Amino acid sequence: MPKLASNTASDSLQPSAVLVVSQRPRPGLGRILPSLEALGLPAVAMLASQLGDALPPPFHAAPQQVVVLAIDAESVRAAWRAGAGLVAGLGSGKHGASQLAAGAELLLEAPSEIGNGSLLSAYAEKFRALPDAAAILAALAGRPLALLFDFDGTLAPVPDHPADGCLPPAMRELLARLVARHPLAVVSGRALHDLATRVALPSAYLAGNHGLELRGADYDPQALELAAGWRPLLDAVHDRLSPLLGGYPGCVIEHKGVTVSVHYRAVAPGAAVMLRRDVVSAVAAFDGLVVDGGRQVLEIRPAIDRDKGTAVEWLHGRMQRLVGHCMPIFFGDDLADEAAFRAARRAGGYGVLIARSGRPTAASCRLDSPEALLAALASLLD
Ligand SMILES: O=P(O)(O)OC[C@H]1O[C@H](O[C@H]2O[C@H](CO)[C@@H](O)[C@H](O)[C@H]2O)[C@H](O)[C@@H](O)[C@@H]1O
């Protein structure tokens, strides 16, 4: 069966589910699920070892859309690594203190506190009031950093048409100065050759097609070979979708070699709902592909463990081999950037969300726009 991912664009400040997580099986845990469900959320209990690098998808929730109620410190750490939207602890005394020390953002001392709604309000407040990244970046000036950027919506304004995305001259000039001090990468959903032309910074690392294509001071032949093997399938899905999407005025289909984007920014809103449904059911006929949702775009890609997060891990590893320890900071704006935020966070760095207002995210701070990013980055040169 084809795998259809459920990465849909939602800016709601309400979580989609609560996971009750413990390190060891605890038969009594099921008793607290009804009080969580009374908050209006689906709730399931699971073991910390089931969380892995990203949360499993009960109810098709992305990690940042989930609250974890952790029963012990190890579960707090596992939830944090997996990118849960909010990590709360449940326990009192020393037990609770160890959960706070492990990174719990909120502590409920007893199950009776579940009903007070603090889980939901802490979740909404966290994302409504994401810290200003400008102050954080200014404090990092002079430290060894690895700077990793998304392209569209982050370094460059989102264009009306895919062909029009371009790096503003002031941003290019600033990046050229930054790359002389810090290893720097651009990690994009665009094809690598397209990205390389638009970025035009010879010493920057590049990742195209959401991490399926990588380019740096050296190459990763394994990743490139892997990507090439998927081309025939992507050709076939492109050929299937092209005539279908001809019936949707304004729709743009972009074949990027190993992924395909369907842009519906200019499609009438009512028709866009049908377009999304048609694309998902057409792709379901092809084994081995997933459809991810972005902002006014559907991204069709191979169902393999490569994304912007794996790209950040690979690039950061390469950079550290060249320059020694450096803290990764990933700047991004869209849902595909969440995996990269999680990877930066796991490596002890930061994600910076570029957005006019907060939304559930694994980023730890926010800037309003590419223009605000330009100003904040300049402080790294002070
Ligand atoms: O990962 P990124 O660098 O942010 O690239 C994501 C996609 O960017 C481009 O699409 C963007 O512009 C489109 C034209 O207006 C718009 O429809 C879409 O919503 C934007 O995301 C690019 O064309 C895609 O290939 C990238 O995957």
Image (spheres, rainbow, N blue to C red):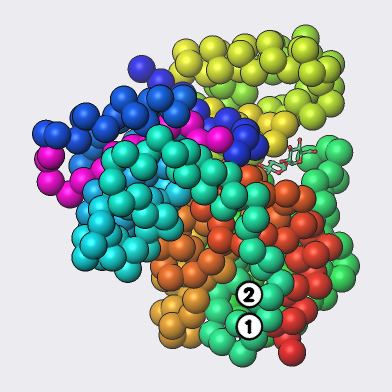
* Figure quadrant of the C terminus: bottom right
The residue drawn where x is 69% and y is 66% is: 132
Q: Percent position (x, y) of residue 164?
A: 85, 45
Quarter-of-image position of residue 255: top right
Q: Percent position (x, y) of residue 170?
A: 87, 71
Instruction: Say whether marks 2 and 1 touch (CB < 8 Å).
Output: yes
The residue drawn where x is 52% and y is 53% is: 362
* Figure quadrant of the N terminus: top left
**Which label sits on residue 139?**
1
- Disc 2 target residue: 136
Side of 227 where 70 appears, left or right: left
Side of 240 where 50 appears, left or right: left
How many tags in the picture?
A: 2
Q: Percent position (x, y) of residue 133?
A: 67, 68
Quarter-of-image position of residue 379: bottom right
188 in relation to 257, above or below: below
Q: Nearer the viewer, residue 203 or 347?
A: 347
Q: Answer with the quadrant where ligand 1 appears in the image.
A: top right
Residues in magenta? Answer: 14-26
Give neighbour class at mark 2: few <14, some 14-19, many 20+ (Cα, 10 Å). Answer: some
Side of 198 where 224 appears, left or right: left
Q: Nearer the viewer, residue 70 or 187?
A: 70
Q: Percent position (x, y) of residue 185?
A: 60, 67
Magenta residue check for 18 = yes
Hey, what amino acid is under mark 2? Ile
Hey, what amino acid is under mark 1? Ala
Quarter-of-image position of residue 370: bottom right
